[in-house]
């Protein structure tokens, strides 16, 4: 384990590309101080306590750097993507989309609204951040955190001015924020940066989001609601014109869709199989799954609200003790159920990252109210977390080397 001086020396070396990206002399001074304050021991990770521990008497300057100034986070985010790509990127890695809530008692902080707060498990006053986490082999590192701005904020000029929300930021649903973040990351890393995109039903239920992923050329595995309509894979679509009478406005489909729940129930109980997707610390990780190929009912909406068949996909159902969960995936037909199950379960590592960033680094401790301040704090927290993962991976690699050297048949 690195001592205090060792990790600070390593942080100076590791942080150098971020300082170069900042360019501004004053920012280069305060950014590493704030990151040190987030990483170092301390019960509270807001600006004043960090200043007291790391730069006594300089709280106003640190507050200006983080909370009041309006510097662009994009250069730091580009360096962060490059760093994380080197740690967990490439074949076998995933991007995971989710959102994480920051509970707030007041109503003045940017984006605060009465909405679902996962941290509390109920509706409450909170800020909601759309998150993109890069993960491989159970090692998650967030690379994107963007505030979801509720409509009542986006459409209030007074609130926007008070929180310094940029003019170009309007109301965007969470799935649209996630797509924009994916485009940004994919543009930086190219087609080989990660294998696929994983997400829960909050994103998977949105047909526009799934189509956006298809347009980006991404493989995906997403949760959906039990009410998601699907067609049998052999459904026939007749687009020929009527021989007599009025021209046909919509193509004819030879069967009606059913819900994901109904489709799985039609398979019968024998369709469920016990699948082991990996070895855990306490033994094999297993669950029961059923799987079937379908055509998703997400084509352009027709009369009476009916959606014709869209692309072919896997419909997967997971049997839990008291409920069933449903998923769609555009992975090809030859994909094994074990691989689909492992991808479904890989999504949970993002929640581990969110929890660690809050508990260890104070992601939810920021007390400023401005748009820029929140995103400054968020990107510096992600950088801090990426550094900790860098140290942990390096130490794990060092510990494994003697075992490899003494292994039978080792060089």
Image: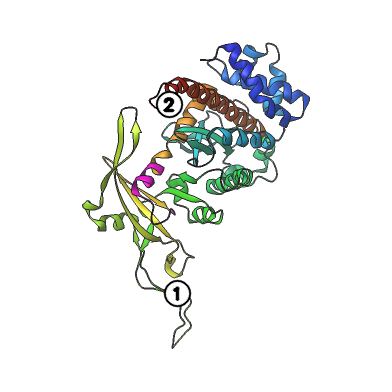
Identify the residue under disc 1.
Answer: 251
**Few, some or many residues within 10 Å of mark 2 (<14, 14–19, 20+):** few
- The answer to which quarter of the image holds residue 315 is bottom left
9 on left or right of 140: right
Q: Nearer the viewer, residue 150 or 12?
A: 12
The image shows residue 2 at horizontal and vertical percentages of 54, 15
Residue located 48% across and 36% down the image? 136
**Which residue sits furthest bottom?**
244
Residue located 47% across and 79% down the image? 248
Residue located 44% across and 84% down the image? 242
- Which region of the structure is painted magenta? 330-343
Q: Nearer the viewer, residue 349 or 308?
A: 349
The image shows residue 362 at horizontal and vertical percentages of 54, 24
Determine if the magenta segment contains residue 241. no
Q: Nearer the viewer, residue 133 or 372?
A: 133
**Few, some or many residues within 10 Å of mark 1 (<14, 14–19, 20+):** few
Between the residue at mark 2 and the residue at mark 1, the CA separation in whole angstroms equals: 64 Å
| Coloring applied to the structure | rainbow
366 on left or right of 304: right
Q: Is 262 located above or below residue 39 in the figure?
A: below
Considering only order in the chain, which callout, 1 or 2, is on the residue closer to the N terminus?
1
Is label 2 or label 1 in front?
2
Determine if the magenta segment contains residue 334. yes
Q: Which structural element holds mark 1?
A: loop
The numbered dot on residue 410 is: 2
The image shows residue 81 at horizontal and vertical percentages of 61, 37
Q: Which structural element holds mark 2?
A: loop
Residue located 61% across and 11% down the image? 5
204 on left or right of 170: left
The numbered dot on residue 322 is: none
**Which residue sits furthest right?**
25
């Amino acid at each position: 384990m690195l001592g205090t001086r060792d990790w600070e020396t390593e942080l100076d070396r590791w942080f150098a590309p971020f300082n170069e990206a900042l360019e501004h002399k004053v920012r280069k001074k305060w950014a590493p101080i704030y990151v040190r304050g987030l990483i170092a021991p301390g019960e509270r990770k807001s600006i004043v306590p960090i200043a007291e521990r790391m730069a006594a008497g300089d709280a106003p300057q640190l507050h200006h750097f983080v909370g009041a100034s309006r510097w662009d986070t994009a250069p730091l985010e580009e360096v962060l993507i490059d760093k994380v790509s080197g740690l967990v990127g490439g074949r076998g890695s995933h991007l995971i989309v989710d959102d994480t809530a920051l509970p707030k008692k007041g109503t003045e902080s940017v984006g605060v609204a009465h909405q679902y707060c996962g941290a509390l498990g109920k509706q409450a006053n909170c800020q909601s951040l759309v998150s993109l986490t890069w993960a491989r082999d159970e090692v998650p590192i967030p690379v994107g955190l963007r505030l979801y701005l509720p409509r009542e904020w986006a459409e209030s000029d007074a609130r926007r001015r008070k929180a310094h929300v940029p003019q170009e930021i309007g109301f965007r649903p969470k799935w649209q924020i996630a797509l924009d973040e994916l485009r940004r990351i994919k543009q930086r890393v190219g087609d080989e940066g990660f294998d696929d995109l994983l997400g829960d039903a909050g994103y998977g239920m949105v047909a526009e989001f799934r189509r956006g992923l298809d347009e980006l050329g991404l493989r995906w595995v997403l949760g959906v609601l039990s009410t998601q309509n699907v067609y049998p894979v052999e459904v026939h679509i007749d687009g020929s014109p009527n021989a007599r009478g009025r021209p046909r406005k919509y193509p004819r489909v030879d069967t009606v869709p059913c819900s994901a729940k109904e489709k799985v129930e039609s398979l019968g109980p024998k369709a469920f199989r016990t699948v082991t997707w990996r070895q855990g610390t306490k033994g094999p990780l297993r669950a029961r799954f059923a799987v079937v190929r379908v055509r998703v009912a997400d084509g352009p909406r027709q009369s009476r609200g009916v959606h014709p068949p869209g692309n072919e996909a896997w419909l997967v159902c997971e049997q839990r003790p008291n409920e069933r969960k449903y998923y769609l995936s555009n992975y090809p037909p030859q994909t094994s159920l074990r691989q689909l199950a492992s991808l479904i379960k890989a999504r949970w590592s993002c929640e581990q990252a969110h929890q660690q960033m809050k508990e260890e680094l104070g992601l939810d401790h920021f007390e400023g109210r401005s748009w820029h301040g929140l995103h400054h704090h968020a990107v510096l927290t992600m950088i801090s977390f990426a550094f900790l993962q860098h140290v942990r991976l390096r130490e794990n690699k060092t510990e494994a080397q003697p075992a490899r050297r003494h292994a039978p048949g080792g060089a």
